[in-house]
Image (cartoon, rainbow, N blue to C red):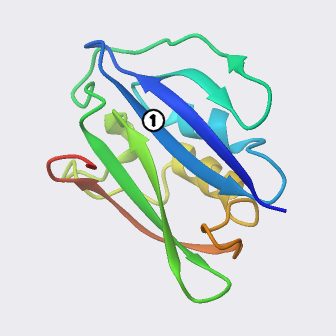
Amino acid sequence: MTFATSTVWKDARGYSRIGLIYTPTGIGGILPALEACSNAGALVCWEGPLTVIGAAPAAALYESGLQVAGLTYICADGTDVMLLIFAPILAVFMADGATIDATNALIVALNAAVIGHMTNASGSLVIAYASGRLIPGGAK
């Protein structure tokens, strides 16, 4: 069975975005690990009963929910899947401010939460982290 989890993110400017994550068993530790990497706050999240979390956005360099980092993962079937961090915190980037630092403790924790727990839309399990970057212009 595949669970689809939707999360509404709110940034310090009042913008909101929605993200969708597929997992075989539920979002579990992915949401708190993703929140730790974002200046936006998870406002609501659902994969069954509605859970109100309460946004705690932060003012920072990438504070807008329109600014997005995309982390690419490899699935068992050879496809890839992207996880978006809305309003990513600066600490998760390398010195260039655009490339995700895979050695950053927050990204290591996020990857540990994702690998083996998230799937692509067809249900193939994530088996490895590939790369991550700030998406110019944000995700549409």
Residue 135, placed above or below residue 36: below
Quarter holding residue 16: top left
In the image, farthest residue toward the left: 137
Left or right placement of residue 10 versus residue 78 in this view: left
Name which residue lies at 69% across and 76% down.
124
Query: At numbered mark 1, what does the secondary structure look like: helix, strand or loop?
Result: strand
Spot occupied by residue 135 in the image (x, y as percentages of width and height) = 24, 54
Expressed as whole percent of the image width and height from the top left, the position of residue 120 reads 61, 68
Image coordinates for residue 107, horizontal then vertical, percent: 53, 50
Hey, which residue is sitting farthest bottom in the picture?
A: 78
The N terminus sits in image quarter = bottom right
Q: Residue at left 27%, top 24%?
A: 63
Mark 1 Cα shell of 10 Å, populated few (<14), some (14-19), many (≥20) = some
Image location of residue 22, percent across then percent down: 65, 56
Q: Quadrant of residue 108?
A: bottom right
Q: Is residue 119 left or right of residue 19?
A: right
Q: Is residue 127 left or right of residue 64?
A: right
Q: Determine the residue positioned at 36% across, 33% down.
A: 89
Q: 59 or 26, which lies in front?
A: 26
In the rendered structure, which amino acid carries the disc numbered 1? Ile
Residue under label 1, please give it: 18
Count the numbered circles shown.
1
Q: Is residue 60 above or below residue 137?
A: above
